Image: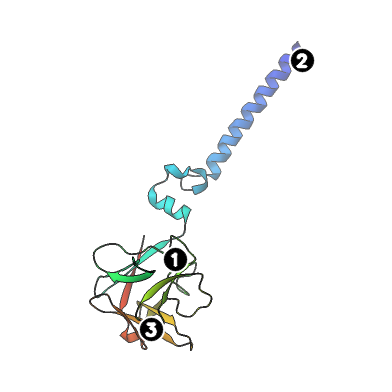
Amino acid sequence: MEHFLLFLIILIIILGIYYIYIDKFKKENFNTNDCVSKDLLTLNPYTRCEILGKKKFMIRDLRTKLWLISGQEEGFNKFLPGRFGISLLMSEKPDDYLPLRTVANPNDYLLSTYTGNGIRTVSNPNDIYFIIQVFIFNGYNILGYVYENNKQKYLYIDNNGNISSKNEPSEASIVEIIEI
């Protein structure tokens, strides 16, 4: 009986040390800012958004204040007033390459139409041509794409939200990137 009582006391001491050590280990390695230690439902919306995906942004023309909106007809997108724009996914290196692709389906890219007067949504485009991306010109963001002959074209948005392609970056509309 004495051996059993001694065994039981030693077992309780070992379990106590184990639980104290594990609790201390958890507190040291998982602080309150660590996303792994929290339940997704207890996070604020911004942190949850960061965990569930990458950074997101919207595009707005600075001059006209029109938002790039997902089109209601046949996959075309437009610049329209009054509401927030389409949510786009930030790339890993936005200073190097920032293609416009949707958050809803990251394989959907925004491409210029062949005539250069529209924006359409295409899943898994097979080459780099016509993919609209953000370029930096004189410190401002402009939209453009690479044309089939490896020339770059740039988008101009008029007061009605109509899009046209220009050959010179100085003729393009300046847009702002609004992170969400």
Question: Residue 139, position in %: x, y?
Answer: 35, 78
- Which quadrant of the view contains residue 21? top right
Q: Which residue is mark 1?
A: 90
- Residue mark closest to the camera, 3 vs 2: 3
Q: Which residue is mark 2?
A: 3
- Residue mark closest to the camera, 1 vs 3: 3
- Which quadrant of the view contains residue 64? bottom left
- At 27% across and 62% down in the image, what residue appears? 83
- At 63% across and 30% down in the image, what residue appears? 17
The secondary structure type at the circle numbered 1 is loop
- At 59% across and 32% down in the image, what residue appears? 20
Tag 2: amino acid: His
> Which of the two residues, 123 or 173, is positioned nearer the viewer here?
123
Mark 1 residue crowding within 10 angstroms, few (<14) / some (14–19) / many (20+): many
Please state if 152 lies on the left or on the right of 65 as rendered.
Answer: right
Label 2, label 1: how many angstroms apart (C-alpha)? Answer: 66 Å
Q: Which residue lies most toward the top here?
A: 1
Tag 3: amino acid: Thr
Q: Earlier in the sequence, mark 3 or mark 2?
A: 2
Label 3, label 2: how many angstroms apart (C-alpha)? Answer: 90 Å
Please state if 134 lies on the left or on the right of 93 as rendered.
Answer: left
Q: Which residue is mark 3?
A: 115
Question: Residue 81, position in %: x, y?
Answer: 24, 67
Q: Quadrant of the N terminus?
A: top right
